[in-house]
Image (cartoon, rainbow, N blue to C red):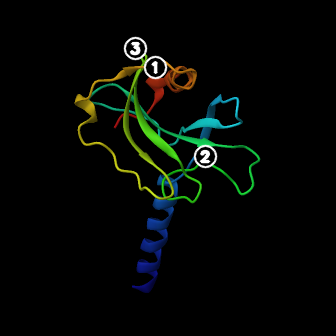
Amino acid sequence: MRRLIALAALSAMAVATTAQAETWKSYAKTPTGLEWSYDTDYSYRDTQTGKVVVMQAVGKPGAEPRMGPSGPGKADGVGFVTAIDCKNKSLISLGGYSPKKPLELSGNWRTATSALAKSAEDKALVESACQGADQLTAK
């Protein structure tokens, strides 16, 4: 019985670790040295809207102490979850996070009005995240 409990605990930890994997793909750099990335492990296509949903975060390569990109709950995690309409090149923010603010996602984002990608960073996110969007997992 103890072995069964230990095996169940190890399996749960393995699943939790997999679900929290972060593979950050850089898509924009600012003149001040900040770098925007999105987590390809988090990215998916929403089945109800067809939009691509990504977790994006800011970081500064080489900074000491380390500064992102990181997901919610991390000491250096600052970012947003964004839904992207690849066809119309528009975005909707689902929520943001920082070390002092946990991530809370909007419950009504699917009915919200999206805004055109205007900034260089937003345009770069749309271009990068929408490449191969048809290959993303649907949720």
Q: Which mark is residue 117?
A: 1
The first of marks 2 and 1 along the sequence is 2
Residue at mark 3: 87
The first of marks 2 and 3 along the sequence is 2
Query: Where residue 50 sits in the image (x, y, percent)?
Result: 33, 25
Q: Residue at x 47, y 24 (%)?
A: 133
Label 1: state its secondary structure: loop
Residue at mark 2: 69
Query: Where residue 127 sits in the image (x, y, percent)?
Result: 54, 20
Is 27 drawn above or below residue 13 in the view shown?
A: above
Q: Amino acid at mark 2?
A: Pro
Query: Where residue 30 sits in the image (x, y, percent)?
Result: 66, 30
Work out how far the residue at label 2 is from the one at label 1, CA to CA, in angstroms: 21 Å
Is 85 drawn above or below residue 104 in the view shown?
A: above
Work out how far the residue at label 1 is from the one at label 3, CA to CA, in angstroms: 12 Å
Between residues 1 and 67, which one lies in front from this camera angle?
67
Q: Residue at x 40, y 14 (%)?
A: 87
The quarter of the displayed image where residue 46 is located: top left
Is 71 drawn above or below residue 87 in the view shown?
A: below
The first of marks 1 and 3 along the sequence is 3
